[in-house]
Image (cartoon, grey):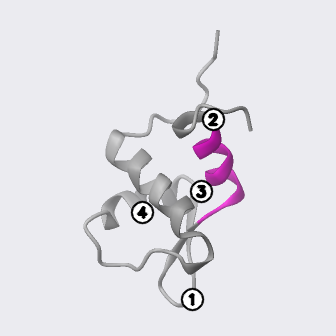
């Protein structure tokens, strides 16, 4: 049984986190439809906004993606 000690990720935010992992080092630009989710992920420490304005997943974001989106143990 898994004990949840992390804030819940809405479906849209899980999708945004998944897109961050797909784009890798290129990052996602600001101003897209998933902007509110990217900002929420940034606030949770799962993403960061680089100096060029693009978002990328943090180490915590990659671990959360592996556990929650891909259903793998990090």
Q: Earlier in the sequence, mark 4 or mark 1?
A: 4
Q: Earlier in the sequence, mark 2 or mark 3?
A: 3
Instruction: Judge the density around disc 4: few (<14), some (14-19), many (≥20) Cα neighbours within 10 Å.
Output: many
Q: Earlier in the sequence, mark 2 or mark 4?
A: 4
62 falls in the magenta region: yes
Q: Nearer the viewer, mark 2 or mark 3?
A: 2
Which residue is label 3 attached to?
45
Q: Residue furthest top?
A: 1
Please provide percent x and percent y for residue 67.
63, 35
Q: Nearer the viewer, mark 1 or mark 2?
A: 2
Image quarter in which the N terminus is found: top right
Residue 38's disc number: 4
Measured Cα–Cα span from mark 1 to mark 2: 28 Å
Q: Earlier in the sequence, mark 1 or mark 2?
A: 1
Which residue is label 2 attached to?
67
Residue 51's disc number: 1
Element type where label 1 sits in the image: loop
Residue located 41% across and 56% down the image: 16
Q: Out of 55 and 73, give the one closest to the viewer.
A: 73
Residue located 48% across and 54% down the image: 17
For the magenta stretch, what is the residue range?
57-66
Measured Cα–Cα span from mark 2 to mark 3: 16 Å
């Amino acid at each position: 049984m898994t004990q949840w000690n992390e804030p819940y990720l809405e479906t849209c935010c899980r999708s945004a986190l998944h897109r961050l992992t797909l784009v890798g080092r290129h990052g996602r630009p600001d101003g897209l439809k998933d902007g509110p989710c990217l900002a929420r992920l940034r606030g949770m420490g799962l993403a960061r906004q680089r100096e060029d304005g693009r978002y990328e997943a943090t180490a915590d974001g990659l671990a959360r993606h592996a556990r929650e989106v891909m259903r793998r143990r990090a």
